[in-house]
Image: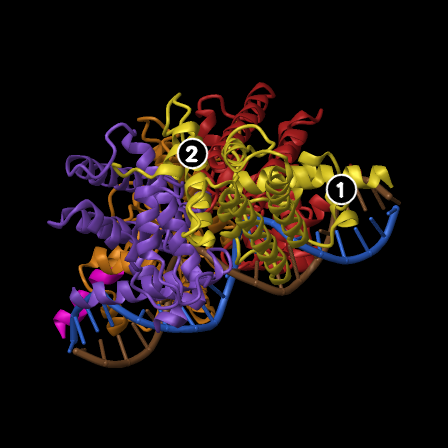
Chain colours: A red, B orange, C purple, D yellow, E brown, F blue
Amino acid sequence: MAEFNQKRQDILNSAMELFKEKGFHNTRMEEIALKAGVGKGTLYEYFTSKQEIFDETCIEKVTGIKEKIEEISLRDITFREKLTEMISMKQGSEKCPEPTIEGIMSNKNIISEKVVYAMMNHVSDMNKIIIRMVEQGKKEGVVNKNIPSDLVVTMIVGTVSEFIRNKCTNNFAGISGEEIIINLLFNGFGVK
Amino acid sequence: MAEFNQKRQDILNSAMELFKEKGFHNTRMEEIALKAGVGKGTLYEYFTSKQEIFDETCIEKVTGIKEKIEEISLRDITFREKLTEMISMKQGSEKCPEPTIEGIMSNKNIISEKVVYAMMNHVSDMNKIIIRMVEQGKKEGVVNKNIPSDLVVTMIVGTVSEFIRNKCTNNFAGISGEEIIINLLFNGFGVK
Amino acid sequence: MAEFNQKRQDILNSAMELFKEKGFHNTRMEEIALKAGVGKGTLYEYFTSKQEIFDETCIEKVTGIKEKIEEISLRDITFREKLTEMISMKQGSEKCPEPTIEGIMSNKNIISEKVVYAMMNHVSDMNKIIIRMVEQGKKEGVVNKNIPSDLVVTMIVGTVSEFIRNKCTNNFAGISGEEIIINLLFNGFGVK
Amino acid sequence: MAEFNQKRQDILNSAMELFKEKGFHNTRMEEIALKAGVGKGTLYEYFTSKQEIFDETCIEKVTGIKEKIEEISLRDITFREKLTEMISMKQGSEKCPEPTIEGIMSNKNIISEKVVYAMMNHVSDMNKIIIRMVEQGKKEGVVNKNIPSDLVVTMIVGTVSEFIRNKCTNNFAGISGEEIIINLLFNGFGVK
DNA sequence: TATGAATGAGCGTTCATTCAT
DNA sequence: GATGAATGAACGCTCATTCAT
């Protein structure tokens, strides 16, 4: 049984990488099998269809992100420290992964409907978690209580995602701007 | 010739809508032809392949966004006013369009390579334009000169994109948060 | 349109021959296409699936038989003459075809359900037609009125089918037993 | 060894039932194994292929029919009694079986060639047996000596098969027509 | 001996593209 | 130029068969 799960995961990992690299429609079942080191037919011992494999990889990715956010949110650290953790967050694999929720959600017309719902629930959960983090900030007296929390979340999520994205496409050669970005979020770019 | 361009544009518009709705691989040439009111074979009088049609729609979309940004950047208004214009920017079509650059770029494994380069150039241009806007802000004395402009751009682009995205998925029921977001960008969410 | 129907019929004929020769599952779409002199994809311009092609060939066959029976039943000849016509009936094609209804019905687990119903209706129609023929015989005073017509039909259909089948498998070398069989049906094999 | 034969027979019985119900190509080896209560691999300990299993079931069925006919033919009873026995003959299993030779022979393009020959020999044997029965009738003075025996056999086999077939498809609700059919065979349906 | 996880040849079907009209 | 009937390469999936245990 442990072995079953292991092989299943191998397939999922191979598929994930190929989907990321070439997209759903340009990835052939045969390639997934080859990469996972199994026969084509074996894929169907673990999954019922290519669609299911794709769905699972998507679910796994959002779940992974959500769990990281959740884990950060539960630590006994300040709001600012949590923000710093989030911005340093990395997807496990090498290279430059598809780290943002948005990248995953852009496959909406490929993912099967029920999985879209599942993912949207995850996204909604993440929003709630981050809203709670913002409210922690308000309690700590470091976040302005007059600003609606959801808009604060919008700025955080947007900025952090864009920052991570840019780091991947190497727009910030060498400079580690995390600290600056955090300050920007707190103080804005305006002159005081 | 004018007629040629008109029909070409009709095809492009039909294709754009279908691609947005169903994705590249789920859109059939026949559907595009049908929607454009031409025969299937006719598509090949105006484009050499489905790929080319897709490439063109992508280019057209980024170009559209870029031109809007450019147009805003050239107006004789303050930096803050330009920001406000950007956040109110809308993609032409009805419903909820695919307005952000990121949504388009997520098709990287479908777009043909040379078009990816073209698009990245556009994106890079846009960055430069926005950087110039930020520098205008610095000159006006409303943007903190000590913060690297590219990081300011990161925050602006990320926040604005996320804001537009959320407005589409109706996360902000009724409340028009544009003004608040602008203030957030300038002052951050921190307590002064 | 005439051309459409012609090509459709060509495909059907090729399919019919192959199905007869090799059965449904051993006949490949490619072979049907090859035999019909069209491309594999073309088959799908005329039919939606292999199943549909098979269904149509079955329908066509029973319909053909039914129409022949019907045509015979409508002629202005005596019951005995009609019987003689039936026993001399031949399926159009060369070689030794699959002439009996039973041969066709033996594909019940291949034919799609709704077509099975259609065929059973045809079979039921044929029974009614033959029953009417028997009743004509009773009116003519050549068929014993005390015997239930459906049992008479059973004997006629069974004997005629078996006779045709045997002629095909060459069990009756040269001898044309039609006349004898008709007499047998009327008088039985018993000694008077 | 007895156990070997028992299990072999179990497999054959399971297969026979499934083949009858769903046909050769729609029956999967896994189903046969499941129904026989053995593992998929075990099937190959007893048979070399699915084909062989099918061949054996066919042989077994014709052999069964032939043996019944043979057994009837050897009894010390009159020709008429033998006929009555034949028409009352039933295939062992419940429901409505595939009792006629023709039903089995309609699989000619599935059965392997050498088995087709074997079956045709059986069929030929059966004909000879029934011919001998007819000749017994002639000796008993109840069958007209002027009619070629093979044509008499044709009428008997055809009528009996059709009768059994119809009884299965419930065309004769309740009425047990066996006696009438026998009389029909002897006397025909003609008016004397 | 019995098993069932693994396999891959094989086939039905789709759809971008072509080309005769 | 405009068309759509015809095409066949390509791919997802099935299932008989194998073989390590």
Which structural element holds mark 2?
A: helix
Quarter of the image for the C terminus of chain D: give it. Answer: top left
Residue range highlighted in magenta = B1-12
**Where residue D144 sits: x, y (%)?**
42, 46
**Amino acid at pointer 1:** Arg
Label 1: chain letter = D
Alpha carbon of mark 1 to alpha carbon of mark 2: how far? 40 Å
- Mark on residue D182? 2
Q: From the image, tell me which residue sits under label 1.
A: D8
Q: Residues within 10 Å of mark 1 (few under 14, many from 20)?
A: some
Q: Is residue C82 magenta?
A: no
Q: How many marks?
A: 2
User: Callout 2, which amino acid?
Assistant: Ile
Residue drawn 27% across and 63% down?
A: C9
| Front residue of A189 and D51 | D51
Residues at discs 1 and 2 both on one chain: yes
Q: On the rendered image, what quadrant is the N terminus of chain D found in?
A: top right
Q: Nearer the viewer, mark 1 or mark 2?
A: 2
SS at badge 1: helix
Instruction: Give the number of the disc on residue D110.
Output: none
